């Protein structure tokens, strides 16, 4: 990988992981459209580590409070708001974790085509617009119910389809269930932490098993760039979300999907 490829892919991962536009689709499409060689598993692990560092750093105070409240809930069998949110994040991760284990090979071999990405980009983009228009937007993330957790967790499993967008699917479900835009986004970001950690762990095990040579300088640069860009993205997105809504991302998804159909049909 040359320096330009490292910078572009790391920034693409950082700026798209937490926006409702599908980071996995962009990481597939950038090499396909530029003619670059696939970046490889090691670099994918590195940029995901970067985005994990970003979200953990951004929500560090909430995570510490949730962790100790979760430990306390195991001892006392009672739930504080932080403890309830911690359990919601853990339980909401289960559907996507199971789907990833069962369908990983099928997804990686059968669903990585530009036309699948185009279809998912448009279809789930329209769902995001509908949820943003029709959602009641009345509750915060500390008010999620177990029914909310089930629906949002299943939506996160559906986001394994490239082009769907994990954050887009979970925000869509959150809006449909009555969460505010900011609450949908914040719960989506918290929900990403165990999933990115687990996915990165499995990818790391595969990388170790492959025993291929590692360019540590490229990986370190990928981690730093994806972490910084993801942190900036989270901050700006949460700051501007209530004012701008989801429409700009819906429009982007429509244009991207149509462009992919024109290029690859």
Image (cartoon, rainbow, N blue to C red):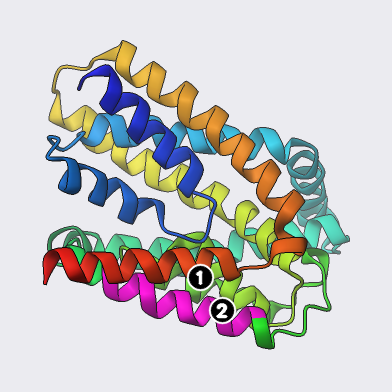
Residue 228: x %, y % from top left = 56, 28
* Residue under the image location 40 percent in, 40 percent down: 12
Residue 83 in the image: x percent, y percent? Answer: 80, 57
Picture quarter with the N terminus = top left
Does 178 sit above or below residue 79?
below
The answer to the question of whether label 2 and label 1 lie on touching residues, with beta carbons closer than 8 A, is yes
Look at mark 2 in the image and give the residue it sits on.
129
Magenta highlight: main SS: helix
Q: Earlier in the sequence, mark 2 or mark 1?
A: 2
- Residue 128 in magenta? yes
Q: Residues within 10 Å of mark 1 (few under 14, many from 20)?
A: many
Image height check: is 264 above or below 208?
Answer: below
Q: Is residue 201 left or right of residue 258?
A: right
Q: What residue is drawn where x is 15% and y is 35%?
A: 36
x, y percentage for residue 238? 72, 52
- The part of the image, by quadrant, that contains residue 42 is top left
Residue at position x 61%, y 60% from top?
A: 188
Viewer-nearest residue: 235 or 198: 235
Farthest-out residue, top: 217
Q: Nearer the viewer, residue 75 or 169?
A: 169
Q: Could you tell whether 109 is left or right of 131 in the image?
A: left
| Quarter occupied by the C terminus | bottom left
Local SS, label 1: helix
- Up the image or down, 198 lies above or below 159; here it is above
Task: Report the side of 54 relative to 178 (left or right).
Answer: left
Name the element at disc 2. helix
Q: In this view of the protein, can residue 25 be seen by the observer?
A: yes
Q: Residue 215: image x %, image y %?
A: 24, 14
Q: Which residues are magenta?
A: 118-132
Q: Which residue is mark 1?
A: 250
Classed neighbour count for the residue bearing mark 2: other residues with Cα under 10 Å, few (<14), some (14–19), many (≥20) = some
Is residue 204 visible from the viewing direction of this image? Answer: no
């Amino acid at each position: 990988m040359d320096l330009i490829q490292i910078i572009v892919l790391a920034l693409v991962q950082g700026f798209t992981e937490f926006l409702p536009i599908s980071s996995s689709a962009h990481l597939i499409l950038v090499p396909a459209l530029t003619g670059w060689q696939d970046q490889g598993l090691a670099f994918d692990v590195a940029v995901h580590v970067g985005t994990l560092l970003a979200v953990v750093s951004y929500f560090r105070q909430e995570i510490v409070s949730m962790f100790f409240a979760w430990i306390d809930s195991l001892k006392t069998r009672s739930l504080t708001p932080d403890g309830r949110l911690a359990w919601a994040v853990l339980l909401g991760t289960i559907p996507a974790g199971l789907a990833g284990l069962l369908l990983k090979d099928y997804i990686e071999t059968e669903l990585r085509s530009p036309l699948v990405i185009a279809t998912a980009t448009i279809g789930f983009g329209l769902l995001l617009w509908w949820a943003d228009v029709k959602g009641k937007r009345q509750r915060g993330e500390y008010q999620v119910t177990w029914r909310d957790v089930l629906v949002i967790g299943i939506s996160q499993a559906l986001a394994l389809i490239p082009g769907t967008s994990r954050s887009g699917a979970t925000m869509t479900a959150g809006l449909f269930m009555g969460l505010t835009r900011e609450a949908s986004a914040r719960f989506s970001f918290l929900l990403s932490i165990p999933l990115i950690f687990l996915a990165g762990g499995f990818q790391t095990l595969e990388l170790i098993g492959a025993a291929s040579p590692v360019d540590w300088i490229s990986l370190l640069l990928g981690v730093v760039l994806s972490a910084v860009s993801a942190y900036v993205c989270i901050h700006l997105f949460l700051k501007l979300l209530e004012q701008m809504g989801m429409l700009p991302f819906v429009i982007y998804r429509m244009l991207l999907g149509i462009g992919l159909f024109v290029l690859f049909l």
